[in-house]
Amino acid sequence: MIHSGGPVTTGRDAAREAAEHELSKPVYHQNDPGLLQRAMDRFWEWVGDLLDRASGSAPGGTLGLVAIAVLIVLAVTALWWRLGSPRRGAAGAGDLFDDGIRSAADHRAAAEAHASAGRWTEAVQERMRAVVRALEERTLLDPRPGRTADEAAAEASASLPDHTAELRAAARAFDDVTYGGRPGDADTYARLRTLDLALDRTKPLLTGPQS
């Protein structure tokens, strides 16, 4: 339809709606960042604002903030060094042996090497493994994957009743250093070593292997 009498004018609201409608077409948004990218951009903007505010309030400005960050990293590193790496949790279900099959003599040698170096946690672990492996080699225990230290102590007590208390204490010490985060020490290792030697000389009751 042809209008006469001057140009056609469009109201402000109608013009805005027409522009919004036009700009909403997909062709104008093909190169827009995705939802994840927009979220990451917002996150880094927030981090930048946070660091700017922190540097403004920290003693020494940005340099002071860097010094504080370095101190935090050093503190975390020192704590990690002191406590060691995270120990196995429930995923291991308390398994006594965590690697391939080795003889009791191998475990004893490893225990003595750790003890000589002052690595008492590892020494306690290896000596307990030597105790259990020696009982398996003497057929007082059936070799069984997944056996825990507590299970080994309970089963061995049937044929070695005079050492029930020592076996339970040894299993508890193994669990404490392996899963409880308690460091081993020379006294604990000495008790395990004494138990290992005593069991080697003890004549068992003829009850057969425990399963």
Image (tube, rainbow, N blue to C red):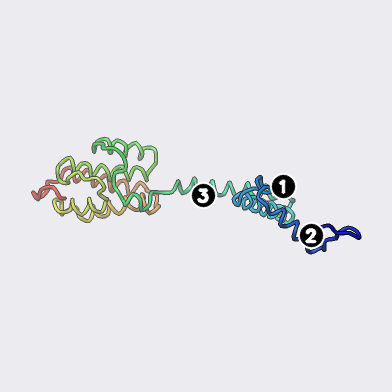
Q: Quadrant of residue 106?
A: top left
Residue beneath the point at 22% across and 52% down: 153
Residue beneath the point at 15% across and 41% down: 138
What amino acid does circle 3 point to? Answer: Leu
Cα separation between marks 3 and 2:
64 Å
Q: Earlier in the sequence, mark 2 or mark 1?
A: 2
Q: Mark 1 Cα within 10 Å, few/some/many (few <14, many 20+)?
A: few
- Of discs 3 and 1, which sits in the foreground? 1
- Of discs 2 and 1, which sits in the foreground? 2
Residue hosting label 1 = 63
Quick one: SS at disc 3? helix
Residue beneath the point at 39% across and 52% down: 182
Picture coordinates of residue 102, whole percent (x, y) = 26, 36
What amino acid does circle 1 point to? Answer: Leu
Quick one: SS at disc 1? helix
Answer left or right for 202 relative to 176.
left
Cα separation between marks 2 and 1:
52 Å
Q: Earlier in the sequence, mark 3 or mark 2?
A: 2
Picture coordinates of residue 37, whole percent (x, y) = 62, 49
Q: Mark 3 Cα within 10 Å, few/some/many (few <14, many 20+)?
A: few
Q: Earlier in the sequence, mark 3 or mark 1?
A: 1
Residue hosting label 2 = 15
- Of discs 3 and 2, which sits in the foreground? 2
Residue lying at the far front in this picture: please name it: 1
Give whichever of 162, 51 is nearer the camera: 51
Give whichever of 134, 31 is nearer the camera: 31
Q: Is residue 132 above or below residue 5?
A: above
What amino acid does circle 2 point to? Answer: Ala
Picture coordinates of residue 28, whole percent (x, y) = 69, 48
Quick one: SS at disc 2? helix
Picture coordinates of residue 12, whole percent (x, y) = 82, 63
Residue hosting label 3 = 79
